[in-house]
């Protein structure tokens, strides 16, 4: 298994703000950075995409989905991205 | 112990009258009327109370990514494609219990920077981009502005969160990309390109000095280029997005390759319609992404009622993403979606929904008749709408969002007024809007009553009941005066009386041109009002009148910075008339250079960054094929000159006339010396309070006491005293006429605008003591027609007489705030007294009045114990704000305002 999962990386986390949200399953308020529950459903993010390449700079990478290879960042949600492909799935 | 001003006054048997017309009850009195929201709205509002202002990079990332690969595309199409990409990629969030959905970002209280407008101000203070902004004067106001430390403001970084622009929290892992995106716009933003060209305008060095000395507060061209206007929901409501896209596609075929007699802009119509198609598709996709999210939540939801609600949300969004709404709820959801889409298109404060109760009346009326809705259900929806509006944040610099706006977004909903035939336009839905605003008291949307003597008494009393809750809304605007102003300003563009009656307020108090639109619903015809003008408060903002007097008295040199702002006037100033004349000359010089530079900035904005979505909503852009940048709006004479500190200027001129020129009690040099030494007082910053009464002497010296007491005792505005009122009238007559001498980039005349918003705090902070006895660094009098705190001693009707000594219809607005103790208007009788008071001012020709109904002792307690007052609302100047989110200078100023114990 990879890094511990956080609530904010779960599809069922509705972010109230940058540090907390509501879990759609439990309806409870949860802290974004706290460890998630067993029902964790990973949110698509650039960092999870097979077309994402890290760069030398922390928290900045490259999207190889389009010919211009623009910069992106691993934490960018990709729920609506037409080019998103899960890495390793 | 340092001597306080209050001690000095007491020793001299004098005082500032912070209470008028009696004394309050012994114990602090809470507000009389307090209702609670529906359980649903209460839960959602509680979420808001707990939410931080949160910024993300999502929208700017997708916008920039698309924009940067479109070199050489036609500018308007390039921007539209970038907007389409950004809208399509926004992550949808729906919160449990919501009936109305969609927001600016995936956070409840989310917003984002727009580096294509300006990219320097939200960088770290040590960053070179920020330093550049500071050096060129555009960030000077940031340095003297502040936010309240409470509520949702993220004024300091913590844990995984970085504070940016003084108010917003962003996840630290997003910061590197935010900075990269900002750097992509270096040298390309409206701020940067505008700066290049504004330097070519005559008098540019004066403009920069005006900004550095904070004689002027902000440039609107790259900070908040739109807003202070009334949106128009008509086209999506009547036709739906699918039909609008088809219409634009058809228009493209009609105009492609044709100039049709217009060799300058005729060909542009093709690109404009193409841009409209892209943005409409982006907004449509964004709406459908929310529908998909609702379907996903429906699929995983275990609880049946919530599951049904997700299904209803999905069905509503799937329909309104393509078609005109069929029900009140669909119409309300569509209006909200359109509103947020406009706010995401550009940096905007003051995008007003206009007369929403009249716009939505057709759906409400027909739903009610068909039994599809009842009043309680409508109220619940309207309460939910209030929470959604309150969650809006505007991302701009600290000087603008903190110093000018106090964090407010000014979505002003207008009520009442007249219909196109001249009959009262109020309806039952508007009464429900008032009731929802009483039950679910929040900052947004703020309300304005378009007062007309024809409006039903019951409707007016309902508005007074709402005011008594202490929310500060509705503000009262004089419908007849507003119509007169509109006819004067927009008559040359074709406005007639019937059209002028469509008036609504944009922003806090900006009288805005609107139009009647023909709506058909199920075979019935209606005429609904909507905005039809450009942003009505852009241009020269804000000019500090007491600072201009300071510059006159000290021969053009700013006393805080030592900067020479204006060339030396070299006048002896040995007559009152000479001082007044020089104030006018410096003011005119400031407006000249600022208007030229601002025209240039706005021109850069409209060339590269023009509104596409907002444009296509406004008549007559879709018909003509011309957007805002080609004067496609029906009304374009919308630039203004905004001032701050009118009453301190007038009181100061009166004091000089009285003490120096008429009675020869002191020489001008003696006054100047006392001002330069702040009458022997510490600065407000040193004292830590920004109201006059709290100021302390430096040491035990009594130096300057005599002169200071004389300045304080000199005649003051607000007492029906012709000595001062004549000066006010002379200023207003000259100022309102003078503004029309300047030409906007739309080749239309500027006009006068007189609202302080929050600028009286930061502008007061940088201004030395003034001859009216005000001390250095303390706030100016709020608004433009409010008396300086503690100086209106003859009751409200004397204040009204002073305020209406000039013709308010010559200005876009005026602004009068009054603080009334709850016991003064208690009960049904008190409600009627409040209406009579209001009516008296309106009948005298006052343009605007608004009330703070509060016991000042409660405000003092809230200042000491903010944690116990998260939901306390106060009226500042044209807007209502949570007490805990206001900076201390404005808090001090509101506490100090004269409290009327009787009316």
Image (cartoon, helix red, strand yellow):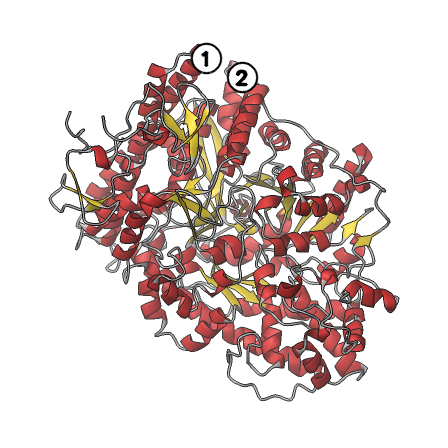
Which residue is the site of mark 1? B305
Q: Which residue is mark 2?
A: B369
As helix, strand or loop, the secondary structure at mark 2 comes to helix
Mark 1 vs mark 2: which is more N-terminal? Answer: 1
Is B351 left or right of A60, judged from the image as shown?
right
* Residue B192: x %, y % from top left: 32, 63
Number of labels in the image equals 2
Q: Nearer the viewer, residue B856 or B329?
A: B856
Q: Classify 10 Å Cα crowding around label 2: few (below 14), some (14-19), many (20 and above).
A: few
Residue B748: x and y in percent read 44, 63
Front residue (pair B174, B632)? B174
Q: Residue at x 44, y 53 (%)?
A: B165
Chain under callout 1: B
Residue at 39% x, 30% y is: A34
**Residues packed near mark 1 inside 10 Å, few (<14), some (14 to 19) or many (20 plus):** few
Q: Is residue B571 above or below residue B183?
A: below
Q: Hey, which residue is sitting farthest top in the picture? A: B304
With respect to residue B334, does B316 lie above or below? above
Asked if the residue at tag 2 contacts the one at tag 1, i.e. Cβ–Cβ closer than 8 Å, the answer is: no
Q: Identify which residue is drawn at 58% across, 55% down.
A: B758
Mark 1 vs mark 2, CA separation in Å: 26 Å
Q: Residue furthest right?
A: B13
Residue B804 visible in the current orientation: no
Picture layout, residue B395 above or below residue A16: below
Asked if residue B55 can be seen in this view, the reply is yes
């Amino acid at each position: 298994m990879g890094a511990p999962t956080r609530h904010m990386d779960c599809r069922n986390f509705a972010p109230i703000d940058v540090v907390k949200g509501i879990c759609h399953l439990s309806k409870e308020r949860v802290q974004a950075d706290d460890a998630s529950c067993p029902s964790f459903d990973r949110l698509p993010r650039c960092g999870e995409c097979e077309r994402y390449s890290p760069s030398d700079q922390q928290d900045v990478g490259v999207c190889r989905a389009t010919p211009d290879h623009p910069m992106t960042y691993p934490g960018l949600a990709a729920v609506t991205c037409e080019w998103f492909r899960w890495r390793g799935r | 112990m340092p001597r306080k001003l209050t001690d000095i006054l007491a020793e001299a048997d004098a005082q500032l009258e912070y209470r008028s017309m009696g004394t309050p009850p012994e114990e602090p009195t809470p507000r009389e009327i307090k209702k609670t929201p529906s359980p649903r709205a209460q839960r959602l509002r509680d979420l808001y109370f707990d939410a931080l202002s949160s910024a993300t990079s999502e929208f700017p990332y997708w916008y920039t990514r698309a924009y940067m690969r479109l070199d050489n595309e036609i500018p308007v199409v390039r921007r539209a494609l970038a907007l389409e990409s950004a809208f399509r990629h926004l992550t949808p969030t729906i919160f449990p219990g919501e009936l109305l959905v969609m927001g600016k970002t995936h956070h409840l209280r989310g917003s984002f920077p727009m580096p294509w407008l300006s990219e320097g101000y939200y960088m770290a203070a040590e960053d070179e981009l920020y330093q550049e902004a500071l050096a060129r004067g555009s960030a000077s106001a940031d340095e003297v502005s502040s936010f309240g430390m409470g509520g949702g403001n993220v004024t300091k970084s913590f844990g995984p969160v970085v504070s940016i622009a003084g108010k917003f929290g962003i996840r630290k892992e997003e910061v590197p990309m935010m900075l990269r995106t900002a750097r992509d716009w270096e040298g390309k933003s409206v701020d940067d390109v505008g700066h290049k060209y504004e330097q070519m305008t005559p008098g540019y060095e004066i403009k920069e000095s005006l900004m550095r000395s904070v004689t002027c507060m902000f440039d609107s061209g790259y900070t908040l280029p739109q807003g202070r206007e009334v949106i128009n929901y008509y086209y999506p409501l009547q036709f739906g997005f699918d039909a609008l896209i088809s219409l634009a596609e058809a228009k493209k075929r009609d105009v492609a390759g044709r100039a049709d007699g217009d060799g300058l802009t005729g060909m542009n119509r093709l690109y404009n319609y193409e841009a409209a198609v892209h943005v409409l598709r982006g907004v449509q996709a964004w709406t459908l992404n929310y529908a998909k999210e609702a379907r996903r939540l429906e699929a995983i939801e275990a609880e049946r009622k919530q599951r049904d609600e997700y299904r209803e949300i999905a069905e509503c969004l799937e329909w309104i993403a393509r078609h005109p709404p069929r029900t009140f709820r669909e119409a309300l959801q569509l209006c909200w979606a359109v509103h947020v889409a406009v706010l995401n298109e550009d940096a905007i404060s003051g995008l007003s929904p206009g007369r929403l109760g009249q716009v939505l009346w057709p759906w409400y009326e027909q739903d009610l008749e068909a039994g599809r809705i009842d009043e309680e259900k409508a109220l619940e929806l309207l309460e939910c709408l209030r929470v959604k509006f309150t969650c809006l944040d505007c991302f701009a610099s600290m000087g603008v969002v903190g110093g000018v706006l106090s964090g407010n977004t000014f979505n002003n909903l207008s009520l009442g007024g007249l219909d196109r035939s001249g009959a009262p336009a109020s309806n039952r839905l508007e009464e429900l809007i008032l009731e929802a605003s009483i039950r679910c008291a929040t900052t947004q949307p703020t309300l304005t009553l378009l007062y007309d003597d024809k409006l039903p008494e019951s409707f007016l009393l309902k508005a007074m009941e709402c005011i008594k809750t202490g929310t500060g809304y509705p503000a009262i605007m004089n419908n007849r005066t507003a119509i007169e102003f509109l006819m004067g300003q927009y008559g040359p563009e074709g406005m007639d009386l019937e059209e002028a009656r469509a008036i609504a307020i944009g922003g806090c108090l900006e009288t805005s041109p609107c139009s009647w639109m023909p709506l058909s619903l199920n075979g019935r015809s209606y005429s609904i009002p909507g905005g039809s003008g450009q942003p009505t408060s852009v241009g020269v903002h804000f000019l500090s009148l007491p600072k201009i007097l300071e510059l006159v008295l000290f021969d053009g040199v700013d006393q805080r910075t030592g900067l020479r702002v204006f060339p030396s006037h070299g006048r002896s100033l040995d007559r009152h008339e000479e001082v007044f004349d020089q104030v006018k000359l410096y003011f005119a010089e400031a407006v000249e250079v600022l208007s030229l530079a601002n025209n240039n900035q706005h021109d850069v904005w409209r060339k590269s960054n023009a509104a596409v979505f907002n444009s296509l909503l406004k008549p007559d852009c879709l018909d003509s094929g011309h957007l805002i940048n080609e004067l496609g709006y029906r009304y374009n004479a919308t630039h203004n000159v905004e001032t701050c500190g009118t009453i301190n200027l007038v009181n100061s001129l009166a004091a000089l006339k009285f003490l120096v020129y008429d009675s020869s009690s002191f020489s001008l040099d003696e006054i100047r010396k006392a001002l330069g030494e702040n009458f022997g007082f510490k600065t407000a910053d040193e004292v830590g309070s920004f109201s006059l009464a709290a100021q302390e002497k430096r040491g035990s010296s009594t130096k300057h006491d005599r002169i200071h007491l004389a300045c304080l005792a000199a005649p003051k505005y607000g007492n029906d005293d012709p000595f001062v009122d004549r000066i006010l009238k002379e200023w207003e007559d000259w100022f309102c006429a003078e503004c029309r001498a300047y030409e906007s980039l739309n080749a239309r005349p500027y006009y006068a605008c007189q609202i302080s918003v929050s600028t009286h705090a930061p502008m007061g902070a940088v201004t030395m003591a003034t001859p009216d006895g005000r001390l250095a660094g303390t706030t100016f009098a709020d608004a433009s027609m409010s008396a300086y705190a503690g100086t209106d001693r003859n009751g409200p009707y004397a204040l009204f007489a002073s305020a209406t000594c000039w013709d308010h219809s010559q200005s876009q607005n005026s602004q009068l705030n009054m603080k009334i103790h709850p016991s003064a208007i208690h009960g049904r009788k008190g409600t009627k007294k409040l209406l009579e008071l209001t009516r008296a001012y309106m009948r005298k020709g006052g343009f605007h009045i608004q009330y703070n109904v509060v016991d000042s002792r409660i405000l003092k307690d809230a200042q000491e114990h903010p944690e116990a007052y998260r939901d306390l609302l106060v009226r500042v100047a044209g807007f209502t704000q949570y007490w805990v989110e206001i900076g201390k200078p404005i808090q001090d100023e509101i506490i100090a305002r004269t409290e009327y114990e009787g009316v």
